[in-house]
Amino acid sequence: MKNSRALMMIAVSVLAGVMAIVFAARWLNQQGSLATRKVAVAAMDMGLGQQILPENVKLVAWPEGAVPSGAFADAESLKERVVRTGVLQNEPILESKLAPLGTRGGLSAVISEGKRAIAVRVNDVVGVGGFALPGNYVDVIVSTKDERRAKDDEQVISKIVLEKILVLAVDSEAGRDETKPKVVKAVTLEVTPQEAETLDLARSVGQLSLVLRNQVDTRSVRTGGITKNILLGIESRPAPVAPPAVRPMTVVRAPAGDPAPRRQCVEVFTGRERSEQCF
């Protein structure tokens, strides 16, 4: 009698535990399905300037509270859009990573507003040994004749003419995910219209070199250039010219006093001559 009652209690406990597990699992599944939504992600790696095709996009369930701003919920809205930065596989495709609507694919899609792209022919030395990759920043040095000197004392001068210039592409590739050096024949730089004029003139009057710089270094350093005599210690570098000091204007006021008395003048005519007499 006692054994049957104990077995019945055990059976009831086991049944209650199983039912609790089933209901808990169903509740968790329901909560999980309610807390997610579809988000468009990249089905494969895409490089900047690439046009998005249907096979480049897939929809995945994404936690509702973690959906990034600018995400897309369907692949149709991404049709023929152009990527302006590299997108990795399974990475959400965001509006901030896309070029404006109507933009055609290619390098022109990644040029910033108000900027221009200009190509510079380089070699393994000028191109910083292949380390000037898309997304890096460089300074541009020109080496030319110093025309400030007399003809019998002409020297070559090297001078930084442009600073913090973005590398858009090397040769015909614009992908920014590579980190290995690559020796190329041409580098495409992003410049303003004024910088494009400077660069075009610089490459016509001398030899160009690229100087790789830290991507987070935004300081501008103005130099006077270096010549052969300065390099060999024959001459010293010119001291930087400080801007002239602005002296405060001193206003001198006339001392207050009695106003000068008014004078009376009379015109005197002597023949054809005229004179004025004041008293």
Image (tube, rainbow, N blue to C red):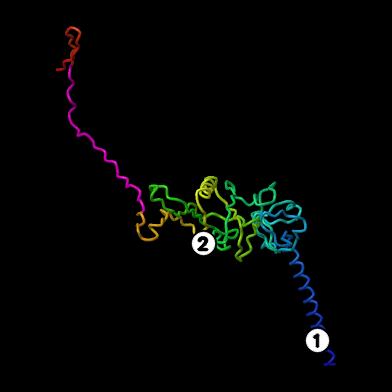
| Foreground pick, 9 / 254 | 254
Residue identifier under label 1: 10
Q: Which amino acid, by three-letter code, is at mark 2?
A: Asn
Badge 1, how many Cα within 10 Å: few under 14, some, many 20+?
few
Q: Which residue is drawn at 18% across and 25% down?
A: 260
In front: label 2 or label 1:
2
Q: In this view, does 125 lie to the left or right of 35?
A: left
Residue 263, compared with residue 235, is above or below; it is above
Q: Which amino acid, by three-letter code, is at mark 1?
A: Ile
Q: Residue at x 26, y 38 (%)?
A: 251
> In this picture, which residue range is highlighted in magenta?
240-264
Residue 256 at x, y percent in the picture: 20, 33
Query: Magenta: predominant secondary structure element?
Result: loop
Q: Which residue is drawn at 70% across and 46% down?
A: 102
User: For the residues marked 2 and 1, what is the alpha-carbon distance in whole angstroms?
Assistant: 71 Å
Residue identifier under label 2: 214
| Foreground pick, 112 / 171 | 171
Could you tell me which secondary element the residue under label 1 belongs to? helix
Residue 104 at x, y percent in the picture: 70, 48
Residue placed farthest to the top in the image? Answer: 271
| Foreground pick, 214 / 216 | 214
Residue placed farthest to the front in the image? Answer: 152
